[in-house]
Amino acid sequence: MKKVLLVFCFGLVLGNTYGQDSVMFRKIADEILLNGTCYTNLKTLCKTVGNRLSGSPAAAKAVEWGRTAMTDAGFPTVLLQPVDVPVCYIEFDALSLGNSKGTGGKALDAEVIEVGSFEELETLSTDKIKGKIVFFNYKMKQNFVSAFDAYGDAVKYRWAGASAVAAKGAVGLIIRSISTGEDDYPHTGSMRYVDSIKKVPEMAVGNRTADKLAKKCKEGTVWARMQSECGMVQGEVRSYNVIGEIKGSQYPDRIITVGGHLDSWDVGEGAQDDGTGCVQSIEVLRTFIALGIRPKYTIRAVLFMNEENGLKGGEAYCDSAIAANEHHVLAIETDGGAGAPRGMSMEVSPAKREQIIKYKHLFMPYNVYDFTDEGGGADISPLKRKLGVPCAGLMPESQRYFDYHHTWNDVFETVNHRELKLGAVTLAQFIYLVDQHEIF
Amino acid sequence: MKKVLLVFCFGLVLGNTYGQDSVMFRKIADEILLNGTCYTNLKTLCKTVGNRLSGSPAAAKAVEWGRTAMTDAGFPTVLLQPVDVPVCYIEFDALSLGNSKGTGGKALDAEVIEVGSFEELETLSTDKIKGKIVFFNYKMKQNFVSAFDAYGDAVKYRWAGASAVAAKGAVGLIIRSISTGEDDYPHTGSMRYVDSIKKVPEMAVGNRTADKLAKKCKEGTVWARMQSECGMVQGEVRSYNVIGEIKGSQYPDRIITVGGHLDSWDVGEGAQDDGTGCVQSIEVLRTFIALGIRPKYTIRAVLFMNEENGLKGGEAYCDSAIAANEHHVLAIETDGGAGAPRGMSMEVSPAKREQIIKYKHLFMPYNVYDFTDEGGGADISPLKRKLGVPCAGLMPESQRYFDYHHTWNDVFETVNHRELKLGAVTLAQFIYLVDQHEIF
């Protein structure tokens, strides 16, 4: 009899906790969906600042925007964390890749050789490549269900292509954009040179131009002229991570970070990448304040600087944490665009993952069902690498992201207000859960 | 020993079937994502036909488009099924609702009274309402996670509002659009009069105009002038359902129908509602043909006419099925827009649902996880009602849909090629599964 009663009581207590969580999940969702300011914040960032390559005057304006947005949302603490970033006034045209050298404004004329993949390059003799411009015609694979996975598969051609072709004597590289888009916008993004190999210029062309170029290459000999003023200005300039914080009521020394990056490439408005992550991070703390949620842990919203071409903000944040001997229990990034949320990825221990998955049913009414993926985000990766901090990331619907990503197309109008807000709902609910149940 | 061996064999057979299904699911996805024609089909429909209210010359053009698209996709059978639809050349302005009478082009001037809900209307005396124009200011609830649910909650004000206010002596009705949009596009859609109550004109205003009107109503007395040429032309005109078919290899007399509706309201391009459903239905059969899948059952793609303002196409399809004594085992509708697929809704027996849910893991890699909802679609509802045919519906992500639905905003550019195709993938996989495993 006693045993039965005990089991019953336990059931009640468990049911009650779940019930309270469920009520708070609903309150969080109502606050953001009905009173959320993230969408108007994003509009201000996109339309009054626009694109904001770190080190540029626009990035400095973005820092001020971030400080004001956090202050307006009523954050008890807002501060700027210094980050020295490259003077990144890259003189791009829409085709050149980040960190690539240009042609010094001069014409570089050479025969084009189309190569489908690194494997095909491997089979070609140096004679075939020498003195030519390689056209890497690797299409981002549309039959990947996750566009993020398709990006992961294709991005190596942008990142490592120039040194690979230069090692065989090529004088330049043209790549098909890493893009799912059916339009002709070339997509920018970072690339890296191997130090020991000659640095040749690299440019991207849009999908339709790539189709035309491939057709021409099949028809006969094609010559191309590459011409670009692209290059990196030497030196550094002072910029900032923008940080807002609510002190923990029980464990003020334990920190949960949620952040996106404030800089963008110098095309479009940086709306999906990653104005979205910035305004969602602000929204989480604004919601806690609006609902009077007093977190047990210190919760920080961080707008990181220089994610796109250096990660100096992520490194500075981590180095500062090390210097101050801070105890970071969890870091969360939102840098996957403004699609409707599908789940949370996690780089945590199997036990912690299990603990979180126990609460999956609380997320299901919000169409958030996937807690299986690994991965956090670039800005929080130094925390993971240097301090072993558990990481997580918001997983939005990926289908549209690589139509916009790193192009002139990445503008405010591509963001849907409800999808943006639902992403913030998932983040706020996740952090509420982790905090209240002291999971980390 | 024998028992163990048996269990082992069973496991192998089951594993093998699942494995084969899984391979075919991948093939279906590859065929659509890499070679699919639904996106270009949709572009042709939207850009060469545009909006196509049934009974209009554009609807006749749409019928020809449908026949051509099916023929081009290699369907073995394509036919036009006659449907007599209202001569629906409604002289709308963007504010009037479908089926509503106008003011005969004359000015209707009256004081405006703002009413928040049917419940509030109930509390108001006839004296308060008589001779006035009621402004139903019921906002579509943004805190519903499913925008379809939010629509279900709010649409009664459009559908039944006019007779409700006329019963209390109102001379007209202005409603806030049934819309999640943050813009000012008024949303059209059907309404119905109660025969015994005086028919008063009904119009919709966009969300921003509704905000302004509400503000004015709070500030003091507001008068409004309603003026519209809106009205229904009497009589009927011959139109068609467009039907394409692959005969079943084993059970040619058992029919699985998949369809969307070909007509649209007379604003926008009918891209999401429901060009999407038409091209996805065509894509399913095209994919079966391209992959050499010989379905056991007869599979039909049906482009229904007159869903928006009469359902004559759905009724004609069902009546023809009754007349021909056809055996319909399952009917599937896709009329929820082009969002990325989330699941399939079903109006089937619990046992059949269980049988399908057994295969959920096959859908999970395609981010399709939700098989819990009820419901099929309007066009297939006569089959359900008159013949008890099991029904199902594609459940896409709903967040953007009611920003576009029934407005000038519903254009091709709102549709993402990958999301559109993934919806077709889910439909093709679902039908493949049901057919191969003879679930119905």
Image (cartoon, coloured by chain):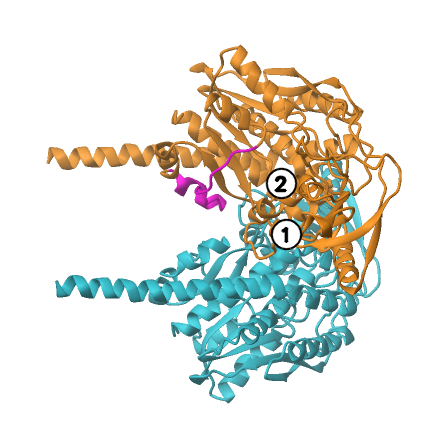
Chain colours: A orange, B cyan
Relative horizontal placement of residue B357, taking residue A227 as reference (left or right): left
Tag 2: residue type? Gly
Q: Secondary structure at mark 2?
A: loop
Report the mark closest to the observer, 1 or 2: 1
Q: Is residue B199 above or below residue B361?
A: below
| Percent x, y of residue B39 | 67, 63
Q: Is residue B270 visible?
A: yes
| Percent x, y of residue A236 | 74, 18
Which contiguous range is marked in magenta?
A359-377
Q: Which residue is mark 1?
A: A117
From this viewpoint, which residue is outermost toward the top? Answer: A324
Q: Is residue B168 above or below residue A41?
A: below
Q: Is residue B167 visible?
A: no
Q: Secondary structure at mark 1?
A: loop
Q: Are marks 1 and 2 in contact (CB under 8 Å)?
A: no
From this viewpoint, which residue is outermost toward the right? Answer: A106
Badge 1 local density, few (<14 within 10 Å), some, or many (20+)? some
Q: Chain of mark 2?
A: A
**Mark positioned earlier in the residue sequence (1 or 2):** 1
| Residue A41 within the segment the image draws in magenta | no
Q: Which residue is mark 2?
A: A337
**Disc 1 and disc 2 on one polypeptide chain:** yes
| Percent x, y of residue A217 | 77, 59
Q: CA distance from mark 1 to mark 2?
A: 28 Å
Q: Is residue A26 above or below residue B250?
A: above
Quadrant in which the C terminus of chain A appears: top left
Residue at image location 64% in from the left, 64% down from the top: B276
Quadrant in the picture for residue B168: bottom right
From this viewpoint, which residue is outermost toward the left? Answer: A1
Q: Is residue A130 above or below residue B296?
A: above
Quadrant in which the N terminus of chain A appears: top left
Q: Which mark is residue A84?
A: none
